[in-house]
Amino acid sequence: MKISLDPVTLATPFFILAVILEIVLARLGRARARYEARDTATSLFMGLGRNVTAIATGGIVAASTLWVYQHRLFTVPVTAIWAWVLIFFLEDLTYYWFHRLSHERRVWWAAHVNHHSSQHYNLSTALRQTWTGGVAGTWALWLPLALLGFSPAMIATQQGISLVYQFWIHTETIGKLPAPIEAVFNTPSHHRVHHARNPRYLDRNYAGILIIWDRLFGTFEPERAEEPCRYGVVKNLGDFNLLRVAFHEWIAIGQDLTRARSPREALAYVFGPPGWSPDGSRETSDQLRAAWRARTGGRAGYFGGASSFQTSGAPPPPSAIQARPEAASNR
Amino acid sequence: MTWAFVIQTTVSALAILGLVALAGWARIAAPRPPLDAAAARAVLAEEFPDSRIGAVWIAADGRAAVARAGEEALIVWLRGDDYVARQAPWSALATAQVSAGTARLAFHDVAAPAARLAVGALAPWPPALEALTLEAGA
């Protein structure tokens, strides 16, 4: 009998048990978690689908990594502790840049957006994985590790450890951890910020295991009690269709390319930040954040919408008036 | 693709169905009572912070709302237990297909191709918010 040493495979029973535990504890009122059945189904089937779609590109990824390893600069011993310590940091640094690119460049966002498409934040969200990561080619970012002399097995193992680590931080059940842990590690609190669509929180906390990279590269944002996270993407999906979840941004890129008026525009549609448009009719994360700051002065409040009336000196909005049947005839 | 993979995938799919059933049984989705005017305005204000929300139209089932900001329609509707928001030209509302008590409002957006809004005697379609919006000073 062949025994798998893949950390993700080994952890799968734990994933299932943890989801069950979170649901049951939430049902009993002992944990803070929201589960909606269709959202949960979407997350879990995206995770299952990823295993299937990965077959299509897994061979290319493995062959490429092996080829680079055959041309390595050094040979890193698999049995040395220092080698595992070193790959822990290097892989985590690689993950940080992979993740940052996946948010800041549209072609890679197209592969990653599905992970953020749930408006929930629970352990099932962690399993909402990409179907198109192999096509997007971000796996190439790990090739330098093979060039340095880390074996493909070491790289894959450390990637698996990182993925398993990131499972448990997809929860609202765990609040802030002791300060030393929050200072060094990616935690549920830090990752809640990453999944939030509040302008203050957009494109922050890209960490895999160590939050130190965000602190180092200026993308860290702490979770604030006065500004609860609102999850999802800036423009949430209209339904739970799996194909839409997996491919909507790719299709949108294709549609934009048909409208591009120059090669430069085409390149910007593909490699520009998500939300870029030649006429400025859409908004990037930076623009959304700037608008929010202009509206609120950076004070807390979801989107600044409600608080803007309180802080700008403008009169409060008029009372809501429901449309009356007779008014309909005016049209 | 081996038999082991097929079996593993099949068992995983069954496990998923079990987890989804558990999630449904637990009834721990966010409670979303039908929108009233105040709730609709709060949702719209969150989703469209740059717009002044005046009068609102609320769907017959309380699961969607429309507001007018100039020549733009601001639309929110419930997907699962949370809201999705989109903006459309106000004139597009008149083009929505209405049948069997539902207005299907199409967007040019692959991420959200259409919103289905329940209409009725108290929620006639298209919404008539012009006078109300002007009255509200928006």
Image (spheres, rainbow, N blue to C red):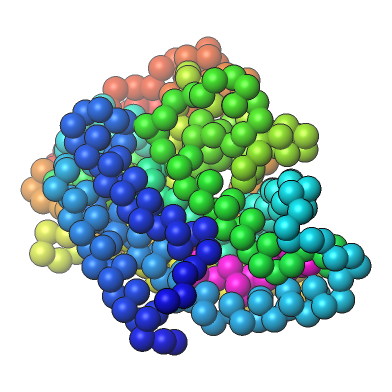
Q: Is residue B72 left or right of residue A89?
A: left
Q: Quadrant of residue B102?
A: bottom left
Q: Residue A7: x and y, percent?
A: 52, 58
* Predominant secondary structure, magenta span: helix
Look at the image and give the residue range highlighted in magenta. Answer: A128-146
Determine the residue positioned at 54% across, 34% down: A187
Of A267 and A117, the residue lying toward us = A117
Looking at the picture, does residue A247 appear above or below residue A291? Answer: below
Instruction: Point out the residue furthest to the right here.
Output: A73
Taking the magenta stretch, the answer to whether it contains residue A257 is no
Q: Quadrant of residue A60?
A: bottom right
Q: Quadrant of residue A186?
A: top right
Of A38 and B117, the residue lying toward us = A38
Q: Residue A176: x and y, percent?
A: 49, 24
Q: Is residue A5 visible?
A: yes
Taking the magenta stretch, the answer to whether it contains residue A131 is yes
Looking at the picture, does residue A248 appear above or below residue A310? Answer: below
Q: Residue A155: x and y, percent?
A: 68, 62
Determine the residue positioned at 52% across, 79% down: A55
> Could you tell me which quadrant the N terminus of chain A lies in?
bottom left
Q: Is residue B51 visible?
A: no
Q: Is residue A217 left or right of residue A59?
A: right
Of A23 and A196, the residue lying toward us = A23
Determine the residue positioned at 74% across, 49% down: A81
Of B45 and A73, the residue lying toward us = A73
Determine the residue positioned at 57% across, 58% down: A160
